[in-house]
Image (cartoon, rainbow, N blue to C red):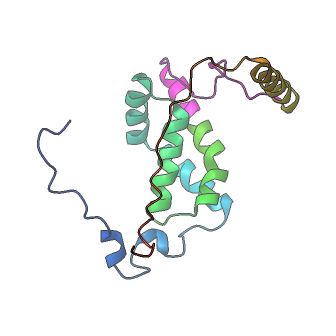
Amino acid sequence: MVDGPRFDAPIPGMSLTTEVGNRPWQQPPRFVDTKDVAEYYVEKLAEDNFADMLVDVAESGIPLTAIANTIQMNSVMQGIHSVDSGILALPVIMEMMLITVEAAGIEYNSGMDDTTSDKPMSTELLLSKLKDFSTEQMNKEPDDMPIPDIEIDTGGGLMSRRQ
């Protein structure tokens, strides 16, 4: 955490001061076809320096799904491919990463395991819970707490005529 104020932070509205089209993501992407995007990732992820970095990061417990999403979004920002092509290439990225970490023989978090118990409810279950809740609320007795008297100023508002 930074102790003092950050003077190197971007100024609000700074992104609006450049000409439209000057940013890489505002240009046509280098790869348009999903097959080309997948081949790009196969080549990039097969490099030795990537494998070493991936093993180090995977050992720290960061889910591989988060790493894969970060990689593809970085490529979108660099103008390599579009967002939809990146999402379609995610299975290729994940498979390459899984092969790499399994070959290294380390423990890793794939991010694809269902470790949470918060599964989405079916519509029927949700409606039955809502019905039970509304029936319970209707059967409750009103509180015996008195309602306080509140004085209302009827002198007028900002746009009222002067008296």
Magenta stretch in the rendered image: 97-122
Residue found farthest to the left: 4
Q: How many marks?
A: 0
Horizontal arrangement in the rendering, residue 114 relative to residue 138 (left or right): left
| Residue located at (17% from left, 57% from top) | 8
Q: Where is residue 35 in the image (x, y as percent from the top left)?
A: 67, 59
Residue at 82 percent of width and 22 percent of height: 135
In this view of the protein, which residue sits in the foreground, 87 or 35?
A: 87
Q: In this view, does 78 lie above or below 108?
A: below
- Residue 162 occupies quadrant: bottom left
Q: Which of 36 and 6 is in front in this view?
A: 6
Q: In this view, does 162 lie to the left or right of 108?
A: left
Above or below for 22 versus 70: below
Please, is residue 90 above or below residue 36 in the view?
above
For the view shown, which residue lies furthest in the right direction?
Answer: 124
Pinpoint residue 53: horizontal percent, then vertical percent. 38, 35
Does the segment drawn in magenta span residue 93? no
Question: Which x, y percent locates residue 132?
Answer: 82, 21
Residue drawn at (21%, 35%) of the image: 1
| Residue sitting nearer the eye, 78 or 8 | 8
Using the rendered view, name the quadrant where residue 18 is placed: bottom left
| Quadrant in which the C terminus appears | bottom left
